[in-house]
Amino acid sequence: MRRLLRWPGNVLHVVHLFLVVVLGGLLYALGRLGTLFIFPRARRARAVGTLRGWLLRRAMTSLGATFIKMGQVMSTRPDLFSPEVIAQLRRLQDRLPPFRFARVRQLVEADLGAPLGELFEHVEPRPVAAASVAQVHRARLPGGREVALQVLRPDVRRQVERDGKLLLLGARLLALHPRARLSDPVGHLRHFVDAIHEQTDLRHEADNYRRFHANFAGWQERVTFPEVVASHSGPRVLTMEFIHGVKVDALPPGSHARVAESVRQAMFKMCFDDGFMHADLHPGNMFVRGDDQLVIIDVGLCKELHEDVLVQFIDMSKCLSMGDPDDLVGHLRRFHVYLDGVDWEALRRDVDAFATRFRAQAIGELDYGTLINEMLALGRRYHVRPVTDLTMVLVGIVTSQGIGKMLQPEVNVFAELARYLMPVLMRRNERIPETAQARAAQA
């Protein structure tokens, strides 16, 4: 009976999705035509990328929670989307209207098996945050300890499963076209949908917090994560320490060297020591409290890295800094995913030009974000992409550089990364690359 009652809503949702796709397609066609007359050839590609990203962002906002969350996951994949599209997707806001406190009470009591008044001394009815997957209430445990009570949105898991099936159907239809099939739309869509689906079981997020606590044991004075209250957590409820602090991007003007270093060191540790990283790390997910302690939150989206990701990263760095074009192309063939029909000779010429520009810059002038964006743009042009793990590492390094520039502009991330990797390489018996950065770090 319940399934029967859901049919009208499902049909309306499909009609809404269809209308959004049709309207979006029409607006894109008109916008593409407009760029031919408004923008010179040199700026046209960027204008089209911005148009695509804007239309995606507006469509996902219109379609609701699942699509908003998917856009946020997509924004972590610069190997698949241009910087203009990524910039638009990062502006997606998942602040949705909160659901009623009566439903919060029902979900908490159903998950934890006791009345709300017995579980908590007090729960504020008005949430402090209402996002696409869950909302958070300030609460106190018996005894007075202040906690954050995170509660999953009612039926959000079913919505994700429903929308995921629709999206995968669309991807399969798209894959019928031979050229579109080369980009593996079904595989990428499945990756995005699986990532969102995992976030609809808060036990995964609780496990991620516990794992980060274990990985960062001994770092508590510099970097920490909220502590999970296991007795008050379940599939749809997550209770954890309430964090008081200032977001990294809201710190007062001036140099914040200790915080900047903590951000860099935490990211390097996740990528190269632990092989387990926060896949959605941005200034809004980092707080600073007394004595410049960095607190990292919102660990629902994490990535387990393959053990050879450091080998891939070092090989790429060696090829960029001291290899010839054949070395760089050889690296792409070994460690990247490439599709049929790659023009390797044309790629070799473009890689040579890229490496020449890169090496001509003084070390202090290098911008890791620009470097990596140019590399990924080359990959997109020739349908050669780094494996997902290496992409996540590159994104993590760019993120740490961006935050570092905001907090401590004078520090060079290349030197800091080389200094961090040197003992890691020696522990793993990896050959240290013969580069200027490596020699400087050893000195």
Image: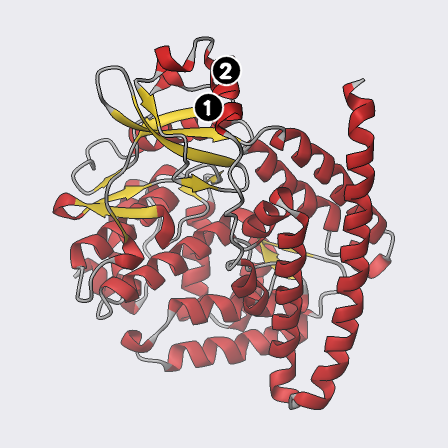
> Is there any visible trace of residue 387 in the rendered image?
no
Q: Position of residue 231 (x, y in %)?
A: 36, 14
Q: Secondary structure at mark 1?
A: strand
Q: Residues within 10 Å of mark 1 (few under 14, many from 20)?
A: many
271 up-or-down from 358: above or below: above
11 up-or-down from 317: above or below: above
122 up-or-down from 317: above or below: above
Q: Secondary structure at mark 2?
A: helix
Label 1 and label 2: CA atoms lie apart by 7 Å
Q: Which residue is mark 1?
A: 237
Amino acid on which disc 2 is placed: Asp
Residue at 72% over, 90% down: 37
Horizontal side of 317 relative to 423 (left or right) equals: right
Amino acid on which disc 1 is placed: Val
Residues 153 and 424: in front is 153
> Is there any visible trace of residue 49 in the rendered image?
yes
Q: Which residue is mark 2?
A: 111
Residue at 66% over, 67% down: 52
Q: Give whichever of discs 1 and 2 has the lower sequence position.
A: 2
Q: Position of residue 108 (x, y in %)?
A: 47, 19
Horizontal side of 405 relative to 88 (left or right) equals: left
